Image: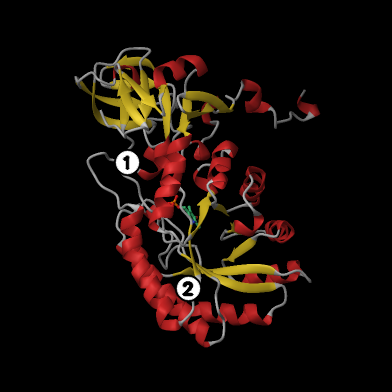
Amino acid sequence: MFEIEGHLECRHGHLFIGGADCVEIAEEFGTPLYVTHEQRIRDNLRTIKKAFPNAELLYAVKANGNLAIMRIIAQEGAGADVFSSGELYMALLAGFPKDKILFNGNSKSDEDLRRAVESGVMVSVDSVMELESLSTIAGDREVRIAFRVNPDVSPQTHPKIATGLRTSKFGIPSEQIVNAYERAVELPGVVPVGIHFHIGSQILSVSPFAEALEKVLGIAKELLNMGIKLEFVDMGSGLGIPYEKDKKAPTPQELADAVLPVFEEWCKENGVYPKLVLEPGRYVVGDSTVLLTRVNSVKGKFVAVDAGFNLLIRPVMYDAYHHVVVANKADVPPDKTYMIVGPICESGDILAKDRRLPKIEKGDVIAVLDAGAYGFAMSSQYNGQPRCAEILVQNGRAELIRRRETFSDLIHTQTIPERLL
Ligand SMILES: *Cc1c(COP(=O)(O)O)cnc(C)c1O
């Protein structure tokens, strides 16, 4: 079985996470269920901090917006990258300090901008039109801003999560960025303090990061020549994780080895020392969490479980691989090739294809690994499925951090017009 010491282990035939028995947790709290190991999140953040000791980390809230999980991340000293007013609301509640929150987004409404101004957070501006609106809304207040640059770099990842190509909707093209800063200097209420890019997600090679950073530092140099001295260079994130256990993903240290020399040389050459900012999402929470799902029935190669793309859409949306372990048969050798399918009324509702697993029976508990990022966060109530509960484990102890939804949660925002009654 795949193991990470102190995090995922097999003990007397059962899968353990953070010292807690997945089979017992499934019994106690019911399935389906997301189970997160607190220490793994802390360790992942510390691994990034060790590789980038002088960098500021802004956690990308969209990866996992659970309040308890964000609280842990805030305790580790990270700030937050938010992409909507809702994420801003949650990040502030979780305790991220406002001066460490960056409000991102390619389509911010005036209401979003108003909230950003009133909350006193920084804004990553995605167009000159947005800049004009922000300046008007700021009035006599001052908002610290960065511009999001589209560096036109291919991250070599799934097309749906490539965000730094010229053809993507994000950011301002490199050749227009200097004009944007000039306009920002002219306008009241907006103070350009940073430059920002983010080229995609689940990137498995470090060279696109270095390539994009070099391009953006070239722009920062032009700005410097114009007298605009930036406080930070935000290189976003997108660092991939090894979902496939026989493959490797670059470590934060490998990323640091590829980008820090480029950054440090630029600083020395120009005699200015802006802060480097990173916005990790997936790396922080991805491998901290398993999705536990129980087998309802077995029909030939099909193993029908109680979680589908309503709870974990990554396999369907991005053709993503998630490793699966039979939690109550973690030391039993494989016997057959199975397809793990969910309860949703679509043939595409497949969690895992062609997996060699021990003989599966009704009631077995299947753990879908690496489900902490873009898992619960992208869940839905499709097919009348209430969303599941979330559990936090630390030192072998399991606590509820989100209750399971009830049937009334399916309908409580709806009304039937009186004339239909
Ligand atoms: C999604 C996103 C991130 C995080 O990406 P990961 O691949 O989860 O590390 C960071 N910055 C921005 C602007 C994003 O949209």
Q: Please indicate whether residue 44 sits to the left or right of residue 66 in the image.
A: left
* Tag 2: amino acid: Pro
- Please tell me which residue is depicted at 37% across the width and 50% down the height of the picture: 202
From the viewer's side, name the closer residue of 410 and 136. 136
169 and 22: which is toward the camera? 22
Q: What residue does disc 2 label? A: 173
Drawn side of residue 389 relative to residue 347, left or right: right
Decide if residue 373 is in sight here. no
Name the front one of labels 2 and 1: 1
Residue at 55 percent of width and 75 percent of height: 230
**Distance Cα–Cα, label 2 vs label 1:** 32 Å
Amino acid marked by disc 1: Tyr
Q: Quadrant of the N terminus?
A: top left
Distance from mark 2 CB to nearest ligand 1 atom below 8 Å: no
In the picture shown, does residue 110 fall above or below 329? below
Locate residue 27, reporting x and y percent. 46, 14
The residue lying toward the viewer, choosing from 391 and 389, is 391
Q: Earlier in the sequence, mark 2 or mark 1?
A: 2
Screen quadrant of the C terminus = top right
Q: Circle 1 is placed at which residue position?
A: 243
Q: Secondary structure at mark 2?
A: strand
Query: Where residue 200 appears, x then y in whole percent?
Result: 41, 57
| Residue 195 visible in image | yes
